[in-house]
Amino acid sequence: MASRIRPRASTPACWPRHSSKSSTLQEARMAVTEPRPSPAPVLWQVRAGIPRQLYWLLAFLGLVVPLTLWWMGSLSGTDSVFLPSPAKVWARTLTWWTEDALLNDITISIGRVVAGFLVSAMIALPLGLLIGSFKAVQGLLEPLTEFIRYMPAVAFIPLVMLWVGIDESSKVAIIFIGTFFQMMLLVAEDVRRVPMAQIEAAQTMGANRRELVEKVILPSAKPALLDTMRVCMGSAWTYLVVAELVAANSGLGHAILKAQRFLQTDKIFAGILIIGLIGLLTDQAFRLVHRKLYPWAHLKG
């Protein structure tokens, strides 16, 4: 009898105690029951779009809230010499328009800004293109440009008056100095962002240096270059008042400085707001042109 009894085979330790099916079911249950982080609200999702109506509502609030705070501050008993009310600033603007040639001041200031900006762009664009394309030109010009661009444009006023005089060219020269060096470096940086793969692909097809610059680098950098022009136009408007320090007898900056002498704070506020409004309209015009010329650059994703 004993010889007929056979020992039962022991289960190897390496065999799984549960089938693969039960293991998969258990993992699925754990995945379902495991808490997951809740998605962020639409306003705080990084680079996520928001409804257009919500965007314009936020933009409206961004304008109305500071205006309301300004109005409340003017009602708190502060002397109008220090903080005129929005109503007084608006009344001064209307008086300036009807009695003091506001339109003429706006036209003259726009002409000065555009002239200084165009002269700056005509020189900065080709030089920036060369700096960004060729290391030799970069080594020759970029360190000097980096050094000069930190010098304040106001400090050049005595030299500009000495070298150029006190006519319209001196105002254009100040705006040129304030925008040229920054524009040249930004253009060079835009050119350097052109993917090297595009340049190498053109080289394998036999493109020479001129063709690389004209047919590869420049077309690829055009959207970024237009954005750079938009930014530098904003800088040109910030130098307007500085430029009109030089023996000006008209223009928005001159009117602001003249109002300062007579403590006409409401006119100072009006001039600053008008410059800001013109700058904003110019910026939006650049953005519109950018969207029309390069719609693919604004596609999401």
Image (tube, rainbow, N blue to C red):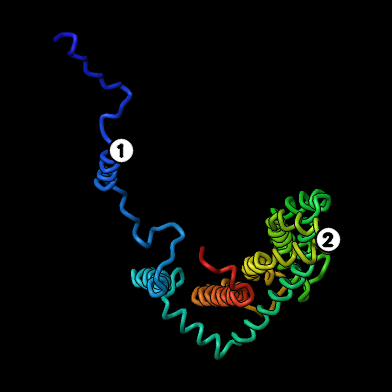
Rendered residue at 17%/13% (across/down): 5
Give the quadrant of residue 119. bottom right
| Residue nearer the viewer, 74 or 262 | 74
Callout 1: 10 Å neighbours few (<14), some, many (20+)?
few
Residue furthest to the bottom in view is 98
In the displayed structure image, the side of residue 45 where residue 290 appears, left or right: right
- Residue 26 vs 47, above or below: the answer is above
Q: CA distance from mark 1 to mark 2?
A: 61 Å
- Reply above or below: 74 against 213: below
Dividing the picture into quarters, in which one does residue 185 lie? bottom right
Q: Position of residue 165 (x, y in %)?
A: 81, 70
Residue at point 64% right, 86% down?
Answer: 104
Q: Position of residue 67 (x, y in %)?
A: 40, 72
Q: Residue 255: in sight, yes or no?
A: no
Front-lying residue, 288 or 231: 288
Q: Nearer the viewer, residue 150 or 195?
A: 195
Which mark is first along the chain, 2 or 1?
A: 1
Q: Which mark is residue 20?
A: 1
Which label belongs to residue 132?
none
Disc 2 marks which residue? Answer: 207
Indicate the secondary structure of the residue bearing disc 1: helix
Q: Quadrant of the N terminus?
A: top left
Number of numbered callouts drawn: 2
Q: Nearer the viewer, residue 74 or 285?
A: 285
Where is residue 301 shown, x and y percent of the image?
Answer: 51, 62
